[in-house]
Each structure stands twice: as structure tokens, then as C-alpha cells.
Amino acid sequence: MPFGLTNAPATFQAFIDKALREFLDITCVVYLDNILTFSKDKSDYEEHVRQVLAALRCYDLHLKISKCSFNTTEVDFLGFRIDTEGIFMDPERIRAVKEWLPPLIKNYLQITAPLLNPLKTGKNKKEIGVKVRQTNIVPPPFPLSKTALEAFKALKEAFTSAPLLRYFDENKPMRVETDTSAFAIGGILTQQFEIDSHLHWLLVAY
């Protein structure tokens, strides 16, 4: 099926979900042609990989070996880096954000601001959003004022300092924190993790 058709991605997703339905969210996750198999130890991992490969073979699906990575504790997946500790941003994307130049037009910050949504908590988004809206009040030509540069710097900092997302553990205490403003609502899920013999509330999901 050519991917140029409107319903092609959804059709293929339904197909691959059917092929791997026995293992989804148990030993693997899949998004279109991106498959991630995971296990707690090496012996289980080898068996899980065999099961996934066997399921793909049953549906006459083939893998390109040059695009595969096996037996690793760290992997780049759908724009994120995943390791044994959790999920964080791809360093290459962080580098690209750090190289952003200051805005030259007034609407640049307004265009960039929505990109923060998956990265920051409601409280911080609100503080940054106020700075961005303030720059939009200034009449053209767009000045590189102190307020504007601070807003742009805050956007870059929000991207490059996004915290590690820990893996959810149903056996650990959990807490949901929410925040709202006149134009946005946000929430985070945290759980208690032990680090150096001390308990800390760490971020699990936005």
C-alpha cells in the first residue's frame, strides 16, 4: 500500500497492531514501521525478539537489518532517547534548539511557543507564556528588547532542560499535580523513587 493515500498510515497501523497483538505493551511497542522490543533481562529479551520476529514472519513482513539494533540498553525511538533509567530528549534535537537564533519578526515567538506543550509543566508554561504574550503587544517593527530576548531564551531553556521521564511503576506511590490559567491547563504525574537512600518525587508523565 502506498503511503501517499490518506488512510494508508491508519490502515498499516491497524495491520501491524494485529500482527503483534499478543505482545503489544507487554514486550513490545509499535508505531507504524517503528518496533521497540523490551525486556527486564537478557535471557527474556532473546525470547521476546524471537517471538516478535516469528509474528512478523507469519504476516510476511520483512525487516531491513541495517535499520535494526539488537541487545542494547539505549536506543533512539520516535525522536526520544530511551535507556534503562527513563525517557529523555534526543541530544541531536537539543543541539538544534541551542543553535536557534534570536527572532527577527514579532510572530516568531508566537509560532514557537506551542512547541513547549509536551515539555513543561503547567506552571512553567504559564510563566513563559506571559513573557511571549508581552512581546506581542509591542508595535512593529519588532524590537529585540530585553523582554523579547528573555522570552526567547526561556523557550530555548524549556526545550533543552526537559527532565528525564521515569518509567511508571504501579507499586510506587503516585501523585497528580495540575495547574490552570486563563488560556491553558496542564498536569503532571510523579512517583516516589529512592535515590541515595532518599525518596524523591520524580516526573513520570505530562
Image (tube, rainbow, N blue to C red):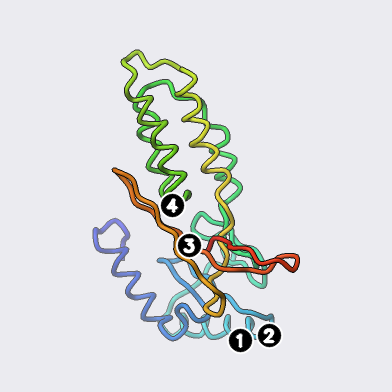
Disc 3 + disc 2, Cβ < 8 Å:
no
- Secondary structure beneath dot 2 equals helix
Disc 4 from disc 2: Cα separation: 35 Å
Distance, label 3 to label 1, CA atoms, is 29 Å
Asked if residue 6 is positioned above or below residue 140 in the image, the reply reads: below
Identify residue type, mark 1.
Glu
Comparing labels 4 and 2, the label whose residue is closer to the camera: 4
Of the image marks 3 and 1, the number of the one nearer the N terminus: 1
Query: For the residue carrying disc 3, how many other residues have a C-alpha within 10 Å: few (<14), some (14-19), or many (20+)?
Result: some
Q: State the residue position of label 2.
A: 43
Residue holding disc 1: 47
Residue 175: x percent and y percent?
A: 49, 67
Q: CA distance from mark 4 to mark 1?
A: 34 Å
Q: Is residue 111 left or right of residue 153?
A: left
Residue at (63% x, 63% y) in the render: 200
CB atoms of marks 4 and 1 within 8 Å: no
Q: Are marks 1 and 2 in contact (CB under 8 Å)?
A: yes
The disc placed on residue 205 is 3
Q: Is residue 198 left or right of residue 188?
A: right
Residue marked by disc 4: 118
Residue lying farthest to the top in this orientation: 141
